[in-house]
Amino acid sequence: MFLAAILLIVILGVLIFVHELGHFLIAKKSGIRVDEFALGFPPRLFSFKKGETKYSINLIPFGGFVKIFGEDVDDESSDPNRTDSFLNKSKLTQAVVLSAGVLFNVFFGYVLISISLMAGFPSIITDRNSDWVSDARVVVSGVLPNSPAKMAGIEPGDSILRVVKGGKTLGPEEITVSNIQNIIAGGEAGEVSLTLIRNGEERNVVVDTTPGIIADKQAIGISMEKIGTVKFPFFRALGEGIILTGQTIKEVAVGLARIIGMAVTGRASLNDIAGPVGIVGLVNSARNFGFFYLLTFTAFISLNLAVLNILPLPALDGGRLLMILIEAISRRKIKPAVANWLNGIGFALLMLFMIAVTVNDILRLV
């Protein structure tokens, strides 16, 4: 888990860097002064200045930030003669600069997905990709907490090579999801012997079947998928990458809308959301499936960040875009004190929410 936590820090750092890089590059291209571009958060370890911009490396390795002249309103940046101020650019230019971080996260996610599709990564076998699959196998995709499988040390990513129960044996050529489910559920309750492959090594585990995990069936507490290594040629991978990126964004948006809807109606639960501690577990599972699966998981997080950031909430890019839209429609500027107050409140609420989700993650582990 420690390695997974380090990996999560690296992944989030890269994704936030990509997001801030989008703001930085488009602001520069638009003629807006950028005062600082930083990796990590203070205290500052090292910095140098090139042109008008200070480039910093900071101690806390959680992403980074960019200081754009005019985003924080003061007398200097609001001077109408300052053409290098964000405030004095057109509403369209401001919107493009604010949207750039989200767009860079989407593009970065697409690039990672396309690379994985070219190199070959574990994927569920479907009619769409079946002609491009090799090394098909049944893999454990999930393990229920406190289940017999969990107690036996079975982990997501384990490939199932052989199953034995009550004198019946499923060999490698007979291994399918349905056959495994049938042999576990059939006959009397008792021990099931599984031969697993993890990181290229075979291991045998013995698990007791337990009634009640699934209604009216014996089970050991695992979910399974038939997966294989999907590898597309270059141009096919680029096209499939666009499709998969679009599908992922749609699924994230629908899931987020469902959670928001449940929150509005009072039916939401923190258990529906994974915080940093929960994501560490997901990173660990993704790592067990291999490097390119982890790459695709990173793309998924990048697309999640893009969707979250476009929400019209204070302190998020979407909230600032909403303010620009209100100003464009009303033809009146929102008072700086009001804008800063809303962003401050929004940021505080986001921090409180993250703390609550993190505490809930920890309590679920205890």
Image: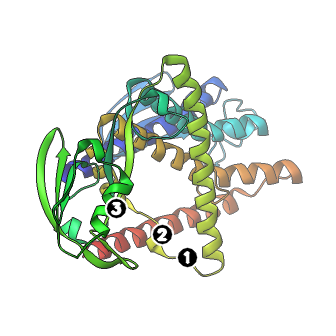
**Nearest the camera: 316 or 203?**
203
Residue 129 spot, x, y in % from top left:
50, 33
Badge number at residue 181: 3
Q: How crowded is mark 1: few (under 14 residues within 10 Å), some or many (20 or more)?
A: some
Q: Distance between the residues labelled 2 and 1?
A: 7 Å
Q: Are marks 2 and 1 in contact (CB under 8 Å)?
A: yes
For numbered disc 2, what is the local secondary structure? Answer: helix
Residue 84 spot, x, y in % from top left:
66, 30
Residue 197 spot, x, y in % from top left:
19, 45
**Nearest the camera: 229 or 166?**
166
Q: Distance between the residues labelled 1 and 3?
A: 33 Å
The numbered mark, 1 or 3, whose residue comes first in the sequence reads 3
Q: Do the residues labelled 3 and 2 touch (CB within 8 Å)?
A: no
Q: Residues within 10 Å of mark 3 (few under 14, many from 20)?
A: some
The numbered mark, 3 or 2, whose residue comes first in the sequence reads 3
Q: How far apart are marks 3 and 2 (CA)?
A: 27 Å
Q: Residue furthest front?
A: 167
What amino acid type should be assigned to the residue bearing mark 2? Asp
Residue that appears at 36% across and 42% down:
11
Residue that appears at 28% across and 48% down:
157
For numbered disc 1, what is the local secondary structure? Answer: loop
As drawn, 67 above or below 195: above
**Nearest the camera: 244 or 228?**
228
Answer left or right for 336 relative to 287: right
Q: Dot 1 corresponds to which residue?
A: 268
As drawn, 235 above or below 263: above
Residue that appears at 37% across and 53% down:
177
Q: Dot 2 corresponds to which residue?
A: 272
